[in-house]
Image (cartoon, rainbow, N blue to C red):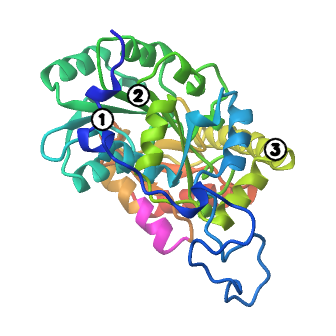
Amino acid sequence: MPFDLTKVIRPNILALKPYRCARDDYSSGVLLDANENAYGPAITIEQEGDLNRYPDPYQLQVKERILKLRGLSSVKNLFLGVGSDEVIDLLIRIACVPSKDKILITPPTYGMYSVCAQINDVAVVKSMLNVENGAFQLCLDDIFTQLKANPEIKLIFLCSPGNPTGTALKHADIKAILESDYEGLVVVDEAYVDFVDKEEGSVATWVDRYPNLVVMQTLSKSFGLAGIRIGIAVGHQDVIQILNNTKAPYNIGTPSALVAADALSEGGLDKMYSYRKRLIGQRQVLIEKLSSFPVPGIGNILGGNDSNFILVQILREGKPCSERAEKVYTLMAESLGVVIRYRGNEYGCQGCLRMTVGTEEENEKLLGQLEEALKTIA
């Protein structure tokens, strides 16, 4: 059935008259309209950009470069947030009435979906991934059962590649949800998508076909810019306009925008692709070395390995053991100088540690200290 945005977005948000800021009208000339400090910023180091001026509220230069990179049709399909977390929060706020509406997530998955839902007093419905043999794929029958039983679900969050699963979801399964009779928004979180080196990559270009699809991306992972906090939403221009209406007027600061624009330049992209190639190569090195580890205690490497991390089981007496995994994690962080992530409390991740792919030197230290930890903790 045709997608009706008015059935998804809260009535008060649809009726919202957004704050109109000074830079919406004029951005050149003698600017005496925004009560800025005309003498400039009170800093002692040279900084690029007019830091005494409010930034472009829509950051068109950055969006134009993302559009070219991702093969999108218009900057009207793009929204920029303070990290993907702002995008998650805004999507819940524009769609879900507190204490009434719900979101659906597919554990094990990124924890901020539930955190943002709780902050906004929105219930969370869970449809567990198929975790058999580390598959980490959608259970479509269960998702459709949950949607039927919970008509208040306004948003479905799908993480592809997943965190902590490191697994890209099957495109056919995402398409099945988009082409069903579900009337809410389907949000695909592609934070790690640039590390996918097979067919099940980005679905960002699908937004022209599916008006209820929102794709989230970020500059934090493949671009190595976690410190500037730039999250991206790709969607139908009507959804993007509502996000723009709802956001804070100047949510992306000038320093972050300048760095983002440089990273998205031809030179920046060359560097990103070079680092991506090296990280994927080091990912394979870690997989091979962990698969033939010199001391016992390493189990299966779970998932599709489509991200910049590896999810590996820690064993005790041949079985995945969360207790041992947590002790290994703690020893490595507190005594051996290597910090990884314990994930053994996640569904389908019993005994698991998540290890980010580092540089060649970092990975060698990781492997050496992991060997030491396994020798110390039986």
Three-letter residue code for mark 3 = Ser
Image position, residue 230 (x, y; %): 58, 54
Q: Residue at x 68, y 61 (%)?
A: 27
Q: Residue at x 47, y 39 (%)?
A: 241
Image quadrant assignment for residue 276: top right
Which of the 4 image quarters holds residue 255?
bottom right
Location of the C terminus (image quadrant): bottom left
Q: Position of residue 358 (x, y in %)?
A: 66, 54
Kindly tell me whether residue 203 is visible in this rendering.
yes
172 vs 4, nearest the viewer: 4
Q: Earlier in the sequence, mark 1 or mark 3?
A: 1
Q: Is residue 33 above or below residue 210?
A: below
The dot on residue 274 is: 3
Q: Looking at the picture, which amino acid does disc 2 mark? A: Phe
The residue indicated by pointer 2 is 136
Q: Nearer the viewer, mark 1 or mark 2?
A: 1
Residue 170's place in the image compared with 1, above or below, is: below
Magenta stretch prevailing secondary structure:
helix
Mark 1 residue element = loop
Question: What residue do we see at 78% from left, 71% from top?
Answer: 48
Q: Position of residue 3 (x, y in %)?
A: 36, 18
Q: Amino acid at mark 1?
A: Ile
Q: What is the distance, in whole Å, between disc 1 and disc 3 at their CAs?
A: 41 Å
Residues drawn in magenta: 328-336
Residue named by callout 1: 9
Label 2 and label 3: CA atoms lie apart by 29 Å
In this rendering, would 307 be left or right of 318? right
Residue 92 in picture, x, y percent from top left: 31, 44
**In this rendering, position of residue 351 left or right of residue 340:** left
Q: Residues within 10 Å of mark 2 (few under 14, many from 20)?
A: many
The reply to whether the C-beta atoms of the residues labelled 1 and 2 are less than 8 Å apart is no
| Cβ atoms at labels 1 and 3 below 8 Å apart | no
